[in-house]
């Protein structure tokens, strides 16, 4: 009876998955906007659990762009993906990047990318 109770309790708890780690990012002007490249490290396990996106925010927390990742990168870690035509307000000297996991959602960590 105790074993069944513990198992029931364990199944009722939410699954905790590590958020993707942003291990690097670059920005350079491209046309009228910016091209942002982000390198992520995550324990992708397959279609049920993978790093599925990252976003670029301004200093006030408003979204400037989002890069959706459409498939797991189990055998490609870390990996880099880019987003073009990000419109960053004139005078901004930095942006904030956050990453998302298909299981745990948006990570709490923020990566500050300073603009040249």
Image (cartoon, grey):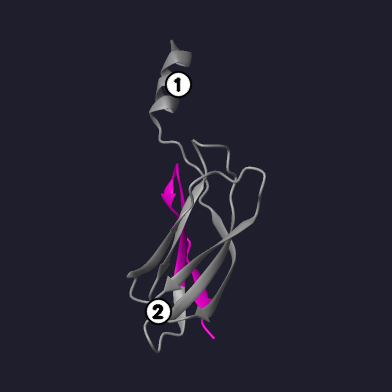
Quadrant in the picture for the C terminus: bottom right
Nearest the eye: 53 or 84: 84
Expressed as whole percent of the image width and height from the top left, the position of residue 105 reads 41, 49
Residue drawn at x 45%, y 62% as measured from the top left: 98
Quadrant in the picture for the N terminus: top left
Q: Are marks 2 and 1 in contact (CB under 8 Å)?
A: no
Expressed as whole percent of the image width and height from the top left, the position of residue 45 reads 58, 38
Say if 90 sits above or below 110 in the image. below
Residue drawn at x 51%, y 37% as measured from the top left: 47
Mark sitting earlier along the chain (2/1): 1
- Looking at the rendering, the stretch of residues picked out in magenta corresponds to 96-116
Q: Which residue is mark 2?
A: 88
Say if 83 sits above or below 90 in the image. above
Nearest the eye: 87 or 41: 87
In the image: residue 28, left or right of residue 98: right
| 110 magenta-colored | yes
> What numbered label is drawn on residue 6?
1
């Amino acid at each position: 009876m105790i074993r069944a109770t513990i198992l029931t309790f364990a199944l009722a708890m939410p699954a905790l998955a590590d958020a993707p780690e942003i291990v690097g990012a670059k920005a350079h002007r491209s046309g009228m906007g910016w091209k942002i490249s982000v390198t992520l490290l995550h324990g992708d396990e397959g279609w049920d659990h993978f790093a599925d996106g990252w976003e670029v925010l301004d200093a006030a927390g408003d979204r400037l762009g989002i890069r959706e990742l459409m498939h797991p990168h189990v055998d490609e870690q870390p990996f880099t993906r880019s987003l073009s035509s990000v419109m960053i307000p004139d005078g901004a000297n930095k942006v904030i990047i956050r990453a998302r996991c298909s299981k745990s959602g948006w990570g709490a960590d923020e990566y500050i990318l300073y603009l040249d």
